[in-house]
Structure formats: C-alpha cells, structure tokens
Image (cartoon, rainbow, N blue to C red):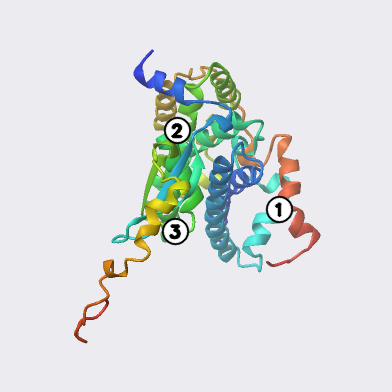
Amino acid sequence: MSELQLRFQIQIQIHMKKWPLWEVFVRSKNGLEHRHFGSLHAADADMALENARDVYTRRNEGVSIWVVESKNITASNPEHNGEMFEPAQDKVYRHPTFYDLPDEVKHM
Amino acid sequence: MKQNLYNYILGIADNSLILAQRMGELCGHGPSLETDIACTNISLDLFGQVRSYFQYASKLAGDGRTEDDIAMLRQEREYVNVLLVEQPNTDFAYTIARHFLFDVYHLLFLTELEKSKDLTLSAIAKKCIKEVRYHERFTSDWIKRLGDGTAESKAKIQEAINDLWTYTDELFHQTGADKAMVAEGIGVDVTKLKEAYYEKVNEVLTEATLETPESKYFQKGGKKGIHTEHMGYLLAELQYMQRAYPNMEW
C-alpha cells in the first residue's frame, strides 16, 4: 500500500461525526491579519480548506485561509483566569497613555 | 431571430440549469453541513451562469419572453440538456460521479467557448470558467477520496461511475445548431473535446484506484428533447412556482 493510499485509508472515515474539528482563520484583505472565523469538520487539511472556502468565504469575505486542527491548539484554562489575567488589570501604566503627544502626530 | 444561435445557447444553458436544479435538491439534505453548503454553492454558481445565457437568449428571441419564461416555461420535449445531468441524486456517490463526469466536459467546453467570435458568449465563458475550475477540483477530490477510501465507498463510487458512463458519449454529439455555429466560428466543436475528456477522466479514476468502464453502449436523446423518466419530476419541481404564480417576481 502506497503512502498516499495509507493516508487516505486512515483519514477517510465515512461517518461524518468521526471527522475531526478544524479551526478556520481568514484574512479578509491583504495587509490585514488572519482572524478566527469559526470551525468545521473535515477528514484532512485539504478538505478543511475547501470546506472553509465554501462555508466562510462564499460572500467574498477573504483572500487567504488558514486551517488548523483544533486539537493542535493549546488554550488557556478559564479556571486559571485569576492568576493569568487579573494581575494586569490594575497596571494601567503598562499602557502607553502617559505621554504628551504633539498634535502633528495622528492615528495614535 | 438568429434561430441557430438561440438554439445553441439553449443547448449550453439547459445542461447547467438542470444540473443546478439537481444540486439544489441537496440544500438542507447534504451528507454534512460542509458538503451541503458546498453542493448548494455549486448549484448557485450554475444558476448564476444560466441567467447570463438566458438573458442573452431572451434578447435574441425578441418576442417579449423573459429569461424566466425561457428557463421555466418550456415543455419537457423543448429542453435540450444531455441525459447525464438529469440523472437523480441516488446517493452521494451518484451525485459526485454525475457532477464530475459533467465538470470535466464543462471545463474543456468553456475553455474553447472563450475563443468564440460571439463576444457575449466569450465573455460569459470567461466569467464561468473560474467557478467551473473549482467545481472540477471539488468533484475530482471527492472521486479520489471515495475511490481510495473504504471498501464500501469504493464500491459505491465505482457503481455510480459504471451506471452513469452510458450517458457520457452524448456530450460529444453535435446538433444542427452546433454544426451551424461551429461553421461560423461561434460554437465549440464538441467532437474535438472527446479525446481530452476521456483522458482526463481516466487520469482521475486511475488516481482514485477505480476502473474506467469499458462499455461501448451509450444512451442518447437529451439533445433532441427525448429525456429519461426522471426529467418530468425534475421539471415539475423546477417549474412549480412559475406555473402556479405566473409572472411572479421575487
């Protein structure tokens, strides 16, 4: 059995519910960053891209798509939000808001 | 009226119209949310293409018939689509096999139509070709996935290909309008697409570890308005709104 065949054998799972979940990131236009648009099911990366094209960009929303299998994303644990995020709340001086900017500087 | 050109346009448009209707039947019934949207997208692409053709046909007819009249209000015998596209969505394998067998033809056809001396047809072909290139990619990928998938998916897609094979040869039959339009440099000589078609189909089937059928018995009739038993049911659904509410508009 060739590697390609083996790949298909492993990846094809006829029952749709066995298809893994993928996260979809779309760049809406050149110069902007890819943003998370949603998720979908697909048997492999190629199918995930095609599905993402059909599900998320059919109304001209994008110029580039990334897909990543959801299991490959490491997420922070909401239970740890206390130690993860709350210490930053009272440290306003970490924002660059204490400078006097000349009027000529725009878009800040 | 340029009768040959009008008939020629109907010959092109009816294939896409009837196939679009078949794919549209899957709206809400696709095997998964993602494939459902994909099939419906493809259907909408085809309906969009069909509008361009029928708008042009309506202008040529010049007798007050609108694009909707031409698309929706003909009798069964007046539709000249190939038999292939009217075959039912028996299961997902049939749906994909039917579309794939048409896509390979459609892409070759539009590539040639783009060179037409008729600037409207050439412009329509140019617009359609990008969509159809995606359709062909989508259905070819699925042929490979199903063919090279499980024993069950392989058996199902092979059966669908074998069953639908008998409708492929008709794609390359010339009608009177075809011949007249080829002579004027407007139409595509479909007989010249045949070799490239079977070559491409064979290439995809081989990659999908499927057998290319060897049967030489082919069905025909659609291009002359003689359809299979499935056509009447399809038209009943397609035409219902215009027949029940004549001249209705969205």
Could you tell me how many numbered marks the image carries? 3
Write down the quadrant of residue B175 in the picture.
top right
Circle 2: residue type: Asp
Residue at which label 3 appears: A60
Q: Nearer the viewer, mark 3 or mark 1?
A: 3
Q: Is residue B134 left or right of residue B5?
A: left
- The residue shown at (40%, 30%) is B200
Query: Hey, which quadrant is residue B168 in on the image?
Result: top right
Q: Residue B48's spot in the image, x, y percent?
A: 54, 56
Q: Amino acid at mark 1?
A: Arg
Q: Secondary structure at mark 1?
A: loop
Q: Which residue type does callout 3 highlight?
A: Asn
Residue B95 visible in the displayed image? yes
Residue at the outermost right position: B244
Disc 1 designates what residue? B74
Quadrant location, the N terminus of chain A: top left
- Asked if residue B5 is positioned above or below residue B227 in the image, the reply reads below
Residue receiving disc 2 = B141
Chain assignment, label 1: B
Judged by depth in the image, the label closer to the viewer, 3 or 2, is: 3
Location of the C terminus of chain A (image quadrant):
bottom left
Secondary element at tag 2: helix
Residue A83 place in picture, x, y as percent? 39, 51
| Number of other residues with Cα within 10 Å of mark 2, as a class: few under 14, some 14 to 19, many 20 or more | some
* Residue A7 image point, x, y percent: 40, 22
Image position, residue A35 (x, y; %): 39, 55
Q: Is residue B41 left or right of residue B111?
A: right
Q: Is residue B189 visible?
A: no
Q: Most extreme residue toward the bottom, as rendered?
A: A103
Q: What numbered label is drawn on residue B199?
A: none
**Do pointers 1 and 2 mark residues of a single chain?**
yes
Q: Dot 3: within a 10 Å radius of its alpha carbon, few (fewer than 14), some, or many (20 or more) residues?
A: few
